[in-house]
Image (tube, rainbow, N blue to C red):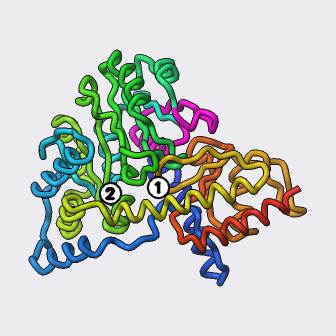
Amino acid sequence: MQLSSFLNRFNEPETLKMAKLGRELRAKGIDVIDLSLGEPDFDTPTHIKEAAIKAIHDNWTHYTPVAGFLDLREAVCGKFKRDNDLEYKPENIVVSTGAKQSLANAVLALVDEGDEVIIPTPFWVTYSELVKIAKGKVVQIKTTTEEGFKINAQQLEAAITPKTKLFLFSSPCNPSGAVYSKEELQALASVFKKHPGIFIVSDEIYEYINYTGHHQSIAQFADIKERVVVVNGLSKGFAMTGWRLGYIAANAEVAKACEKVQGQFTSGANSITQKAAITALTNDLRPSMEMVKEFTKRRARVLEIMKEIPGIECSEPDGAFYVFPDMSAYFGKKDGEAVIANAGDLSMYLLNKAHVSSVMGDAFGDANCIRFSFANSMEKIEEGWNRIKKALAALK
């Protein structure tokens, strides 16, 4: 069977691959603790679910506008004003079937073959693959645990060439949990001001899961705002992963381009989800903040446990719900059977030996690290890390 060569441009997401392997082990009756997936283990708040039920009874069951219902786009504009002090109009907003589609729309609308896209490492697995789909060239800026997994203005300036078209990053970051301060973003914005041909895609899906205080968006700087595409959505902050709704805010020309791309792939997002999203975005954020309080406790406990395990180096995540430790001290070790050559081997070893799923750092652009989620119950987290501790101790 001859399939399209298009499939050779990109890889299957390692996050989904590890989740699939975990499910296969569970199907065999093995108790696998999932520390791999980026999904809040909370239910969608009741008032949002009730809004969806009402939308069904009110017969909001027909095709939707490609860019989203007007009242939802107005609600998104209200959210940006309330939370970020950013002014947008409905014409600047495009609603999609998840933030992943929003990212895909933006990359496909902005990147031509041969264009360079700067991505700081570590990065969410899909960023690089979207660039490859668009036939662009990924330019990585390596960061380290010591740097808090953040780049500075000098590193950014050094990575820019005449072919640079786009800068793509997240804050809070998946997988590292790094959060850029206003001053750090200002320094980056000062570089972009000197290079007016570069667009910036700012993935802010973890905005509410922030342990440092108020979220800062790079779109706040007027000199570059017209070139910033802000990506956000409901999955993380409102525990609405299965509802599939994301959105962008961008200048009207870029928004129209993203709408055109989406029109040929999926058209408009789910009608019931859109109506529920209006309720999510316009009501108070207490349910989201209660969820963050629990994540804060889990983060503290995970960091405490990791300090008890020799050979693990980890910066404290300031946002999201992951730790991304450097595990390279275990490379070259073995337990009598398995030999750990790299992060991929170690991640598979932990799955098969400790029955704990994780995601190898290679997928995120850092071959020394492994991503562990703490979007699971405290009981499961405690048990999972106890298993990890024992499995690592068996390596000599």
Q: CA distance from mark 2 to mark 1?
A: 27 Å
For the point 36% across and 20% down, the residue is 190
The answer to which of 289 and 6 lies nearer the viewer is: 289
For the point 19% across and 65% down, the residue is 279
Instruction: Where is residue 93? Give x, y as percent.
Output: 19, 46
For the point 21% across and 62% down, the residue is 283
The answer to which of 263 and 256 lies nearer the viewer is: 256
State the SS at label 2. loop
Instruction: Where is residue 269? Give x, y as percent.
Output: 23, 61
Residue beneath disc 2: 98
Mark 1 residue crowding within 10 angstroms, few (<14) / some (14–19) / many (20+)? few
For the point 47% across and 45% down, the residue is 173
Residue bounds of the magenta highlight: 121-150
Is residue 12 visible to us here? yes
Amino acid at the residue labelled 2: Gly
Residue 133 inside the magenta-drawn segment: yes
Q: Is residue 339 above or below residue 222?
A: below
Residue 205 left/right relative to 5: left
Amino acid at the residue labelled 1: Leu
Residue 148 inside the magenta-drawn segment: yes
Residue 346 left/right relative to 241: right
